[in-house]
């Protein structure tokens, strides 16, 4: 490893995402996070596309206390709130602060993930300060109002050929198709919808499938 290079992070097979839009209140969010932790989830992203900064910060701080050190907590989009809530990292999309700008905000030690939707974006992100790259949507998804075009399993295979960085597949991933996504080259699957109902049971089933 060259001087100053970052060590490759290790991702768990299951990358849980708590999307606030799927829960009625903060209490339910925390209950779900607690169930996921009990099931063995070790990487969890807090995602809030519509809340104000105060709400996002309050939620993230509660999750930080609840999860302790056994679960790495990733903030979606907001590098500033990642720092304020003492999250372990931040995940940014194509419309957010650039990876270089995000790294300047969060410093050298926190995790940085970047969403990509095609080979060009993935190659750009691969050359950036990102620790891991996400590719998707792999399948049709209801988690975004205006999703990018579906990349399919071939898109995951193509992404795998273009980077040595840890690769997260996202978009429409369920217990029924998760194994195929891993076999296509993803290191980890990011899941929203299929963890929303019966989160502990669903997460445990994912772990059995992805062993």
Image (cartoon, rainbow, N blue to C red):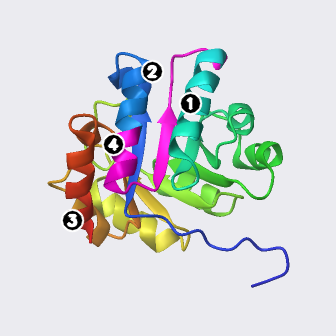
Q: Is residue 10 above or below residue 107?
A: below
Secondary structure state at the residue bearing disc 1:
helix
Mark drawn on residue 62: 1
Mark 2 Cα shell of 10 Å, populated few (<14), some (14-19), many (≥20): some
Q: Is residue 145 above or below residue 178?
A: above
Which residue, given by chain and number where applicable, does mark 4 sit on?
35
Q: In the rendered structure, does residue 42 fall within the stretch colored magenta?
A: yes
The residue furthest left is 176
The location of residue 37, given as percent across then percent down, is 40, 49
Gap in angstroms between the C-alphas marked 3 and 1: 29 Å
Gap in angstroms between the C-alphas marked 1 and 2: 9 Å
Which residue, given by chain and number where applicable, does mark 3 sit on?
208
Q: Earlier in the sequence, mark 3 or mark 1?
A: 1
Asked if residue 117 can be seen in this view, the reply is yes
Which residue, given by chain and number where applicable, does mark 2 sit on?
26
Q: Earlier in the sequence, mark 4 or mark 2?
A: 2
The residue that appears at 24% across and 56% down in the rendered structure is 204
The residue that appears at 27% across and 51% down in the rendered structure is 203
Gap in angstroms between the C-alphas marked 4 and 1: 15 Å
Q: The N terminus is located in which quarter?
A: bottom right
The location of residue 93, given as percent across then percent down, is 57, 39
Q: Give whichever of 97, 91 is nearer the camera.
A: 91
Mark 3 Cα shell of 10 Å, populated few (<14), some (14-19), many (≥20): few
Point out the stretch of residues depicted in magenta.
34-53
Residue 145's image quarter?
top left
Asked if residue 170 can be seen in this view, the reply is no
Mark 1 and 2 residues: CB-CB less than 8 Å, in contact? Answer: yes
The residue that appears at 66% across and 33% down in the rendered structure is 78
Q: Give whichever of 57, 171 is nearer the camera.
A: 57
């Amino acid at each position: 490893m060259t001087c100053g290079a970052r060590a490759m992070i290790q991702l768990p097979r299951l990358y849980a995402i708590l999307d606030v839009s799927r829960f009625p209140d903060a209490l339910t969010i925390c209950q779900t996070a607690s169930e996921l932790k009990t099931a063995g989830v070790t990487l969890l992203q807090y995602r809030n596309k519509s809340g104000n900064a105060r709400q996002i910060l309050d939620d993230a701080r509660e999750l930080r206390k609840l999860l302790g050190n056994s679960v790495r907590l990733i903030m979606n989009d907001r590098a500033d709130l990642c720092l304020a809530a003492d999250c372990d990292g931040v995940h940014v999309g194509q419309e957010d602060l650039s990876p270089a700008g995000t790294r300047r905000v969060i410093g050298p030690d926190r995790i940085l993930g970047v969403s990509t939707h095609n080979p060009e974006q993935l190659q750009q992100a691969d050359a950036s300060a990102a620790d891991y790259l996400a590719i998707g949507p792999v399948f049709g998804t209801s988690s975004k109002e205006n999703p990018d075009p579906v990349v399919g399993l071939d898109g995951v295979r193509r992404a795998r050929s273009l980077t040595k960085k840890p690769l997260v597949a996202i978009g429409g991933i369920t217990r029924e198709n998760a194994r195929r996504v891993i076999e296509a080259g993803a290191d980890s699957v990011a899941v929203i919808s299929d963890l929303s109902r019966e989160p502990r049971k669903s997460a445990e089933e994912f772990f059995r499938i992805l062993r």
